[in-house]
């Protein structure tokens, strides 16, 4: 089984795949202070609740935008699972050409999203990731990752507003009854929901104008299900898109390894005192 791990700024998502079948998934708070021991205990407990055993894991693929949180996860995989994880980075052979000026600036999650979107929805395609930041990823008709756009995310924008405005307080993000809010809570909800939906549509329209043709729009991220129904341009909601991207990339590399006569699973025997790279 493949364990795919997406370490984001706010949450760490994990999915377990048996071949192409999604077996189980979990979401944790990202914590850069969590140790390898804590991560091992957490993973074992989560799997046992589903009747699964960590010993069933034969491969691990990871993407991370939080280096301090990556280190203990990699240490746990090497020590407790006896596996060398695939860590998605700028040198990984994803099968997707990248036209970004400096590919090393790209977050691994952005490439994973683009790979999964192209594989599952074709090209061209636009991904909107509604997480800590709102990110647009663009794949050309030829299947090349072109780049995208980044804006402050829904939750952090609302948090910043509440901190700077003395008479506003935190609210639960939910769909408002109408655009004309009759209370401060409803007004905030209307502004956030409809404002971000409009922002998504406006950026998509500019992207399509530069592409010279329309493209399907796929939304992912923790707030995708809330925002997508109010967008005119989002056609698909895929909450596991990043993890699917890791699955697609791992499949590609595993096939290449099989073709070259390599082994799919090789226990890791690190040298004494070896350090886990950040």
Image (cartoon, rainbow, N blue to C red):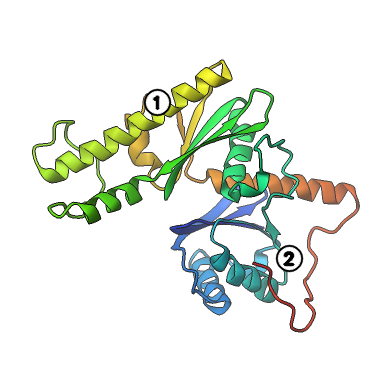
Q: Which residue is mark 1?
A: 202
Which disc number belongs to residue 99?
none
Q: Which residue is mark 2?
A: 84
Q: Residue at x 75, y 46 (%)?
A: 93
Quarter location, residue 68: bottom right
Q: How many marks?
A: 2
Q: Residue at x 21, y 55 (%)?
A: 170
Q: Residue 131: in sight, yes or no?
A: no
Q: CA distance from mark 1 to mark 2?
A: 43 Å
Q: Residue 44: in sight, yes or no?
A: yes
Nearer to us in this view, 140 or 1 = 140
Residue 271, how many percent across, how many down? 80, 79
Left or right side of 57 for 46? left
Q: Which image quarter holds the C terminus?
A: bottom right
Residue 255, how many percent across, how many down? 80, 46
Query: Regarding mark 1 in the picture, which secondary structure is present there?
Result: helix
Which of pointers 1 and 2 lies earlier in the amino acid sequence?
Answer: 2
Nearer to us in this view, 175 or 146 = 146
Contact (Cβ within 8 Å) of mark 1 with mark 2: no
Query: Regarding mark 2 in the picture, which secondary structure is present there?
Result: loop
* Comparing labels 1 and 2, the label whose residue is closer to the camera: 1
Residue 142, how many percent across, how many down? 69, 24
């Amino acid at each position: 089984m493949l364990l795919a791990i997406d370490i984001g700024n706010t949450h760490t998502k994990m999915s377990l795949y048996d071949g192409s079948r999604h077996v189980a998934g979990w979401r944790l708070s990202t914590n850069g202070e969590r140790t390898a021991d804590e991560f091992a205990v957490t993973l074992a407990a989560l799997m046992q609740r589903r009747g699964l055993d960590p010993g069933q894991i034969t491969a691990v693929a990871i993407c991370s935008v939080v280096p301090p949180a990556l280190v203990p996860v990699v240490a746990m995989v090497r020590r407790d699972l006896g596996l060398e994880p695939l860590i998605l980075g700028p040198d990984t052979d994803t099968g997707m050409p990248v036209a970004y000026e400096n590919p090393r600036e790209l977050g691994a999650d952005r490439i994973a999203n683009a790979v999964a979107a192209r594989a599952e929805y074709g090209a061209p395609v636009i991904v909107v990731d509604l997480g800590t930041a709102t990110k647009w990823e663009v794949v050309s008709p030829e299947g090349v990752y072109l780049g995208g756009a980044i804006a402050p995310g829904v939750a952090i924008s609302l948090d910043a507003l509440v901190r700077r405005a003395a008479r506003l307080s935190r609210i639960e993000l939910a769909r408002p009854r109408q655009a004309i809010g009759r209370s401060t809570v409803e007004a905030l909800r209307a502004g956030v929901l409809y404002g971000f939906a409009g922002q998504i549509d406006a950026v998509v329209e500019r992207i399509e104008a530069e592409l010279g043709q329309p493209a399907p729009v796929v939304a992912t991220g923790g707030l995708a299900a809330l925002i997508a129904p109010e967008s005119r341009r989002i056609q698909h909601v895929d909450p596991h898109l990043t993890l699917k991207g890791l699955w697609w990339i791992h499949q590609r590399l595993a096939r290449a390894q099989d073709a070259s006569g390599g082994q799919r699973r090789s226990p890791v025997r690190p040298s004494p005192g070896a350090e886990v790279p950040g």
